[in-house]
Amino acid sequence: MPRVHPLPSTRAAAVTALLALGAGGVARAQGVAVKVENPLDAPRAAETVAVSVKAIRALAAGLEPGKLVVVDDAKRPVPSQLVDLDGDDGPDELVFQLDLPAHGARSVLVQAGERAPAPRDAFRAYGRFVRERHDDFAWENDRIAHRVYGPGLETAAREPLISSGFDVWVKRVPRLVVNEWYMTDDYHRDKGDGADMYAVGKSRGCGGLGIWTGDKLAVSRNFMSSRVLANGPIRLEFELTYPPWKAGDSMLSETKRITLDAGSNFDRVETFRRRRHRQARGGRRRARQEGGLDAELGAAQAGGGEPRLRHRPAARHVGRPSGDRQRPPARLRSPARQIAASVRHRRRLGPQPRRRRPRPRRLGEDRRATRARAGRPGTRVAGRGTRPLSPGLSPAACS
């Protein structure tokens, strides 16, 4: 029986969604049955379940990815969200939430239907790039809020700060408050709905990355670009890219992918990093990326053990950048490096057919061609230029 696991998280680690086959429920003509089980002794309220769209279509190829809806046993609609994980404008996961009893299970049906835009009150997860506050990126759900610092804060006239730590905003209310707090610019005082009470400074905060090199902790600067993949109402997922930074004898390039679900107190932070090794001679650097894939730093196993390194394809950036994403500044090359890059490009292309260069025009050709177009006798157009007519011939005889 094929299993479809939701995105691993603290809340959803013990839940497994099953695509029912055989006697347990086959892929029906009108949709696909999905069974969710809870093996724990405690009930799970508003548990997030993510099912792969590819797995759904493997059982029911006629279902259009952009028109998938979820209904329960009583045919009542279950709020759901389509998530694009690679930025190609196509849904990759179907996300919904269920209340699961202890040692219990629930079944839903994924079928074709028209998806209506979620109303404003249904959004319980949201995040955005805050250009007006020195390029912050802030995000929240109905329980917690966070922010990280962008490039604008490094050169701010008042209180500049270089830090890749995660700031924490505590909330007393379930409604979304990020836009409201930035609008009033008075979020360090608790006026009944929470406040920014955590001074992250240069620390790692709640999710920042650091690498120990001997007795020194190497950290990155402020993030330089952001990209939102999913923005509610149930799941928020986005990426932050940091400029290269030095860790011992290596240069690292880091991209974080942060996921926050509605009703969760915890964020899931995945880090993709590319390492550049310095050679002993010449000072040249060589990028190392095993298997052509970005490396993801996995978490330690539940039963103990060292963190493991597994491979995952890097997310593609396609299309024009949205307002939530900034392009990093272009890297300048020296003339010698530009010539070397051009030579490498030509070698990759291989031999190319030679192009015939146009013959330069001779003095007086433009004037004779103008006279020929005006229909004046005594000249005619011949190929690229003009030449005098033979004596005794009229223009009509040469046409």
Image (tube, rainbow, N blue to C red):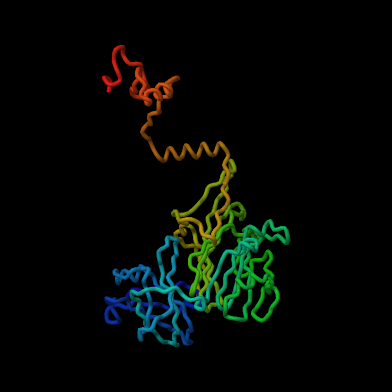
| Residue 170 horizontal/vertical position (percent) | 63, 76
| Residue 31 horizontal/vertical position (percent) | 31, 76
Q: Is residue 305 visible?
A: no
Q: Quadrant of the C terminus?
A: top left
**Eyeballing the image, is 173 above or below 160?**
below
Q: Is residue 348 visible?
A: yes
In this picture, residue 369 sits left or right of residue 332: left
**Eyeballing the image, is 39 above or below 398?**
below
Q: Identify the residue at horizontal 34%, vertical 24% (top origin).
A: 383
In this picture, residue 265 sits left or right of residue 82: right
Q: In this orientation, which residue lies closer to the viewer: 309 or 173?
A: 173
Q: Quadrant of the N terminus?
A: bottom left
Say how many tags the image has: 0
In the rendered image, which quarter is residue 58 located in?
A: bottom left
In this picture, residue 32 sits left or right of residue 320: left
**Eyeballing the image, is 103 above or below 373?**
below
Q: Identify the residue at horizontal 54%, vertical 63% (top origin).
A: 256
| Residue 309 horizontal/vertical position (percent) | 49, 62
Give the residue at the far right of this rendering.
158
| Residue 174 horizontal/vertical position (percent) | 57, 80
Q: In this orientation, which residue lies closer to the viewer: 302 or 168?
A: 168
